Image (cartoon, coloured by chain):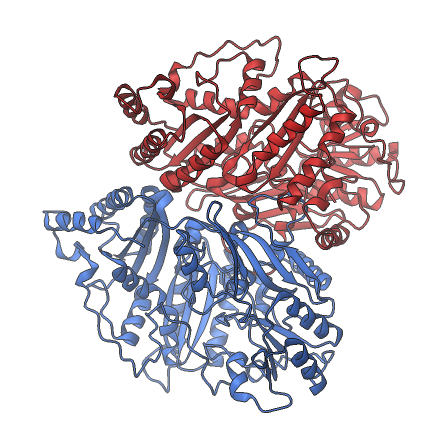
Chain colours: A blue, B red
Amino acid sequence: MACNPRISLALLRRARAPAPFARASRTLRPATQLRLASTTAEAHQHDPTDTSKAAPSPPKGISFTTEKYPQLQRDSRFAKLTEEHVNYFKDLLGKDSAVIDGVSQDATDDIEPFNSDWMRKFRGHTKLVLKPGSTEEVSKVLKYCNDNMLAVVPQGGNSGLVGGSVPVFDEIVINTARMNQIRSFDEASGIFVADAGVILETADSYLQERNHIFPLDLGAKGSCQIGGNVSTNAGGLRLLRYGSLHGNVLGIEAVLPDGTIVDDLSKLRKNNTGYDLKQLFIGAEGTIGIVTGISIICPQKPQAVNVAFFGVESYEKLQRAFRDAKGYLSEVLSAFELMDGSSQQVVNSVTGKKHPLEGEYPFYCLIETNGSNSEHDAAKLEAFLEHAMSEEIVADGVLAQDETQMRTLWSWREGITECLGHWGGVYKYDLSIPLSDLYQLVEDTRERLNSAGVIGDDPEKHPVVTVVGYGHMGDSNLHLNISTRRFDKEVEQLLEPFVYEWVAKRNGSISAEHGLGLTKKPFIGYSRSDTMIGLMKQIKNLYDPKGIMNPYKYI
Amino acid sequence: MACNPRISLALLRRARAPAPFARASRTLRPATQLRLASTTAEAHQHDPTDTSKAAPSPPKGISFTTEKYPQLQRDSRFAKLTEEHVNYFKDLLGKDSAVIDGVSQDATDDIEPFNSDWMRKFRGHTKLVLKPGSTEEVSKVLKYCNDNMLAVVPQGGNSGLVGGSVPVFDEIVINTARMNQIRSFDEASGIFVADAGVILETADSYLQERNHIFPLDLGAKGSCQIGGNVSTNAGGLRLLRYGSLHGNVLGIEAVLPDGTIVDDLSKLRKNNTGYDLKQLFIGAEGTIGIVTGISIICPQKPQAVNVAFFGVESYEKLQRAFRDAKGYLSEVLSAFELMDGSSQQVVNSVTGKKHPLEGEYPFYCLIETNGSNSEHDAAKLEAFLEHAMSEEIVADGVLAQDETQMRTLWSWREGITECLGHWGGVYKYDLSIPLSDLYQLVEDTRERLNSAGVIGDDPEKHPVVTVVGYGHMGDSNLHLNISTRRFDKEVEQLLEPFVYEWVAKRNGSISAEHGLGLTKKPFIGYSRSDTMIGLMKQIKNLYDPKGIMNPYKYI
């Protein structure tokens, strides 16, 4: 993406001029002035602020999900895997690499990455991983499983945050990694069709070479798969600009548990011929079928991209900054991300990097624009900056001058998730809350944990390291994260149901974009009525009457 | 909406300069130069080019749908209405105006507008119209109907084009007109919540006063209701810019036939807690329940709106104009509408108005921009115009200088539908076709009817007046319309299944945005596989096992 040096030059000129830009604490500095600390590669094999890398392989020694959630019982209706089953799959899928067999042989090392997740939070007991290479193979695999009452877990890039793609007991993992072909792209319409197992970043790079972009972007883009993105209705960084998958996905190919292939892979922007069934698979988290292909409309690649990063003195001012950014930047505003001071301290202390801004502020925001005309976008951004500085809405800010600086600024937002795991585990809440109340939850949670004396520096006495809030302010979507040295019953009891009740009182959602998976399943009642839950169960029973699809999760 | 006089001034300056703008036939004229013929109000009580008016009341003397479609048989499982039923509804709904009773008394005149449609194409035999005033009343009405096997037709503004909201036999009409309250609007998030019976134009005006717009606009906005828009998944004029209802609708309140209230009226942009059931109601055409309320995210009102109208010499050039408009106008391009020469002749001959362009062209297109900065939008449009003129992509064009001129230019697009009905009836096809093939269908159809000798000026010999093509080029959505003096079996047999087979061969859709209703029901197989139709029937049976909801239609 081309960046626009003219903005920052213009700002530099202004920055040297007298008030209101002259005061040092409120001067906009170009991001080149950032001193980047060298990364301590030994200490952190995966650099969490390097968003170009895939998520790390899951580490060993994670405790089993069944130990953490002793109330979970294996559903006795499911058959136990036998060598006969395994032989059927080996015959069917042919290639050795398509079947990782832990039944007739010891394949622990090979199976481990599919049995657990990168957060070290979930670990299943699967003994079989299948990697079908086509929709027809998925159909045969599922039909066999359904006929034989074998439970399954569909798995894409396994980068989820709620344990949705990790087995709990001995469910067979059906991994879509081998279904990784791009099927077609039409430059005139922007319609892209591909297998479910295509990595998001691969899809986006392919499209960028053809002057388009994938209408979704998120931190895990190097490892997550587009089928998983659709199955979890991923929101990501630019929903504000490009809209949700419910609007952008034009067609889906999926396989139902009985082997039926749902051939709804439309390449049409409009098709009002009957119920829009594909929508049920968007966000179904693999509980009614496996998505094997998607068709999606992709926007043209923006010719101009700008990224700015601000320090803000209060949440009230941050809200004002957002409202005014919508006004000034309007159609080119592609992201408005919130990061609180604590989240930035975490990234700083884990990576050792110097923060883009010199002073410390209770709030930060990252603003991105995507547009077709760099001059126009620069003018819009400049008008916003001038307004925001002169009205003292923001206290300090930097503006990226090239793509490297853009990535650096984004890393202070995208790196938060992984840095939070530095000390052990993280309690993660992904919430929709009306904007005016959004940050109050972070303060209330921090206060609650402080009062209970569980936050602090003493590893013995204090399980909690810090409470942070960040997220997609443009979508009223808060990520409340509690970074801990260990998972702790007392902390858990302080957090739940407190957080859920707090959100329910404000008619928010207990899962904005991460989904339900295993962890949020018990709490759906805080966001959905009994009627709605009943209707959802009806749908589950309609498509998966035997219940073999991703059991113990969702609803 | 503020218009931007600077664009046209700039263009005028250019227009006076030497080549390539100097040649008279290729000069861009401001739309003020249009001479507007006085409307012949006597001849056309409803001026079809005045888009500010509601659709006209349905005329009398329309033949019954059951006569036109003699193969339709009343489903004998449905009960016949009795005075006892009517009394129940009168007790329940209280107000006299809420029940139009043609059972215990003769209410033909009052009932007629609900029994037929504005196109004079459909006419039912209903004897009872109910106008519940709340979701609870809809729930009680539907439960009673379901318990007593009384078939119903949900009806909003009754402005549909496929007979979906008109009864066929004696189905009870449940009209949502009395449910017309705006429930809430949040300026910070743009989220609007309202009853299903709110008129689209009312909703949009309310929002415009609050610096927002409804993310949908269409010709029937003065009479159609937002619940109907959602139930038919209306596409309209600016889908290109603001996206589909599947992306914009955040929540739905609906009533199932058994009286269950689906309370899914979320006011959150993101909510990944379970299957997105509301999506099933978007485009279900009242076959599984009645939508009673919607929550929708609305964009900010554009500060700058521009409308330009061009004459183009070939379909190849029109495609190029579209591709280049996307490049030059990008994020501000809000509509790219196609009108062929025949469609413009029809509007001209019916309204007597002078066309905005002096010469005649085989193709015309209307381009609209919606943006936040009039100077930037003007510059983008000017760059596009300069490119399109100098490359001879467009042959002539005008640019609106104020809101009146914008409406005038739009009237040459929006007025087509109604003008086509001037001579009698219209065979209407609403199709999605890959862009490169889109207009070929109009030519092939015209050729086919010409060869059969059914097009011409002699009312005795020629049932067909003209074949026209227009539509939303930005969405690959063609409206193929055959304007006739009378509905004619021979013409019908020439058109069907010809049109559907033509579209199916190109993997298009036989209903892009108008839905299935009564007329397209038999043809869904041209756009959907047996598997998909089977899965849709499963959904219908799940929610409406007794089949009382809008029978004889959809799938």
Going by the image, does B139 lie left or right of B127? left
* Closer-to-camera residue (B414/A531): B414
Q: Is residue A257 above or below residue B255?
A: below
Going by the image, does B256 lie left or right of A166? right
Residue A172 position in % (x across, y down): 63, 78
Residue B334 position in % (x across, y down): 44, 36
Quadrant that contains the C terminus of chain A: bottom right
Figure quadrant of residue A486 = bottom left
Residue A283 visible? The answer is: no
Q: Residue at x 42, y 63 (%)?
A: A201
Going by the image, does A222 lie left or right of A72? left
* Closer-to-camera residue (B471/B488): B488
Q: Is residue A349 above or below residue B341?
A: below
Residue B208 position in % (x across, y down): 44, 33
Going by the image, does A164 lie left or right of A481? right
Quadrant that contains the N terminus of chain A: bottom left
Residue A439 position in % (x across, y down): 39, 59
